[in-house]
Amino acid sequence: MIPEPSKDLIQQSKNGDLQSFKNLYRHYEKTIYGFCLRMLNNQQDAEDAVQTIFLKLFRNIAGFNYQARFTTYLFTIARNACYDILNQRKNMNEDLDKADHISGNTTNLDHDISGAISKLPERTRECFIMFAIEGYPQEQIAKIMSIKTGTVKALIFQARQKLRTWLSE
């Protein structure tokens, strides 16, 4: 899990300071890209999602009111952007199970794990990625997804069970 930005940096961004917003972007770009890549299993879609997310953040950062953590606010935007792309794919009848779009040099085990994660149902995959890969606490995931902490725990448990079964085959 990455550290929260300072309130000064957020406030300066809210006041329209472009350099402060660029610092926020640099601070979160790789984390958000990784999340989107794991959610979407497509490098181009992940890159597009990152641009959309930070554009939405730029337009709406003035509405951030410090009632939640900044990362909760940002990951909520990211989550919604990923679901928008996934819904567009469904509407275009594209195959959602293409694990071969993950870029980079990976071992067979990494590829198998990535492929297995991509086969999880959307909500289950989202919880698992935020918890096991991004390192967010279950309570924060519950806030981001607007569900109960118990539901997050159940989805993570289901993800682990399915992954264990698939990877042992």
Image: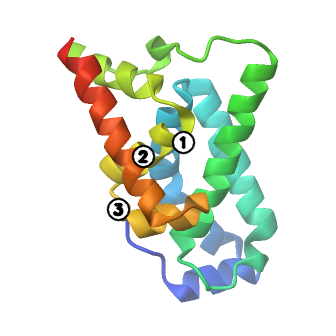
Query: In the image, what residue occupies the spot 53% across and 77% down?
Result: 69
- Mark number, residue 1: 3
Label 1–label 3 contact, CB within 8 A = no
Label 2–label 1 contact, CB within 8 A = yes
Q: Left or right: 79 with respect to 61? A: left
Disc 2 or 1, which lies upstream in sequence?
1
Q: Left or right: 25 with respect to 135? A: right
Residue flagged by tag 3: what amino acid is it? Met
Q: Secondary structure at mark 2?
A: helix
Disc 3 residue crowd, few under 14, some 14–19, many 20+, Cα 10 Å: few
Query: In the image, what residue occupies the spot 52% across and 64% down?
Result: 148
Q: Position of residue 56 (x, y in %)?
A: 76, 57
Q: Give the answer, above or below, for where 103 lies relative to 24.
A: above
CA distance separating discs 2 and 3: 19 Å
Residue under label 1, please give it.
Answer: 123
Residue flagged by tag 2: what amino acid is it? Leu
Q: Position of residue 157 (x, y in %)?
A: 32, 45
Residue flagged by tag 1: what amino acid is it? Arg
- Mark number, residue 155: 2
Q: Give the answer, above or below, for where 29 lies relative to 45.
A: below
So how many labels did they put on this image? 3
Q: Quadrant of residue 143?
A: bottom right
Q: Secondary structure at mark 1?
A: helix
Query: In the image, what residue occupies the spot 61% across and 80% down?
Result: 10
